[in-house]
Image (cartoon, grey):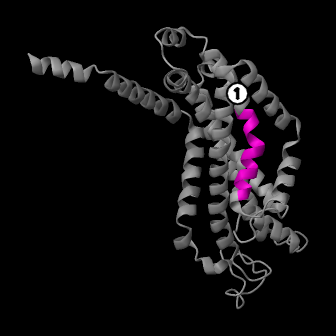
Amino acid sequence: MSDVVKTQTTTFSPRSFRWQRRRAATVDFWSRFRGDRLALFGLAVLLTFIVMAIGAPWISPKEGLSAVDSIDNPTWATPRFDYPFGTDNLGRSVAAQFVWGSRVSLWVGLSATVLTIAIGSAVGVTAGFFGRWTDATLMRLTDWFLVIPFLPLAIVLASVLDRSLRNVVLVIAITSWPGTARLVRAQVLTVKQRLFVDRARALGASRFHVIRRHILPNVAPLILANVTLAVPISILTETTLAFLGLGDPKRPSWGKTLEEAFNAGAISRNAWWYYLPAGAGIVIVVLAFTLVGRAVEEILDPRLREGGL
């Protein structure tokens, strides 16, 4: 008899019930996502670039980035078998710059997005849940960042700070969090008015417990969807800063490749193989993230699903 009771307790425990709900939600999410061909295409493209970025040391040796090691290479060589993407004005392999540049661009885009979402979510949850003077103060700060033009502020901050990837990530995060904060705050204001939140408060749950167990789980889908849509913005911002000469001069990136190609006169020489791979890589990755992000947003937001039916 005790074994039966123990089995039933284990089967219907709150933890197992939550695990079953999460598993069912994951299966439902994947089944919906798999039905979107554009999203699957975008995911395949992203996985390809991620694998390329991780395997950069094996795909293209780093020596191809050094002008000293490329002194014997022909300059402005058109694409051919030994140089798939040709060479630049210093004889460096454009293919090596493309492969290693994908590593930096993706790393900066993902890191800046994580920091952006963390700051925006913290501000949005705090402002929406506590309200009153806390909400007023944080939202006035958010409005201040929204009023200032995004790109000029990023350029000023990048100019003041040292030119390093860490500072580039910090600049992107500082200038990009207000939009996330606004979205999360609006969702928190809706969630905290629901009956299960009032019941938790009536039972004596602390504010931290309510935020952790009721607010964040219901805001998480919005945050996840915002992550996939924020990565393209971070990548484009890093590209812009690098093209303006405000990136890390020691690290190759697609934006840095475009800057060097422009300064070397690749456009006037019609050396399309120098700037086209980096430009195409930026467009393809941004488009892939956008396709995946739109699909995730539509799946996680019931209102969008109902509007599409």
Q: Residue at x 52, y 66 (%)?
A: 55
Which residue is nearer to you in this view: 177 or 22? Answer: 177
Q: Secondary structure at mark 1?
A: helix
* Count of numbered circles on the image: 1
Which residue is nearer to you in this view: 124 or 65? Answer: 124
Q: Is residue 135 left or right of residue 100?
A: right
The quarter of the image holding the N terminus is top left
Packing grade of label 1 (10 A; few <14, some 14-19, many >=20) is some
Queried whether the magenta region covers residue 216, the answer comes back as no
Q: Which residues are magenta?
A: 167-180
Coordinates of residue 20 in the picture (x, y in percent): 35, 26
Picture quadrant where residue 271 is located: bottom right
Coordinates of residue 107 in the picture (x, y in percent): 62, 56
Q: Is residue 125 left or right of residue 262?
A: left
Queried whether the magenta region covers residue 171, the answer comes back as yes
| Magenta stretch: dominant secondary structure | helix
Coordinates of residue 270 in the picture (x, y in percent): 86, 71
Picture quadrant where residue 26 is located: top left
Q: Does residue 236 appear anywhere in the picture?
A: no
- Residue at the spot of label 1: 183
Q: Residue furthest bottom?
A: 72
Q: Does residue 31 appear anywhere in the picture?
A: yes
Residue 294 drawn above or below residue 4 = below
Please state which amino acid type lies under the numbered disc 1.
Leu
Q: Is residue 47 left or right of residue 128?
A: left
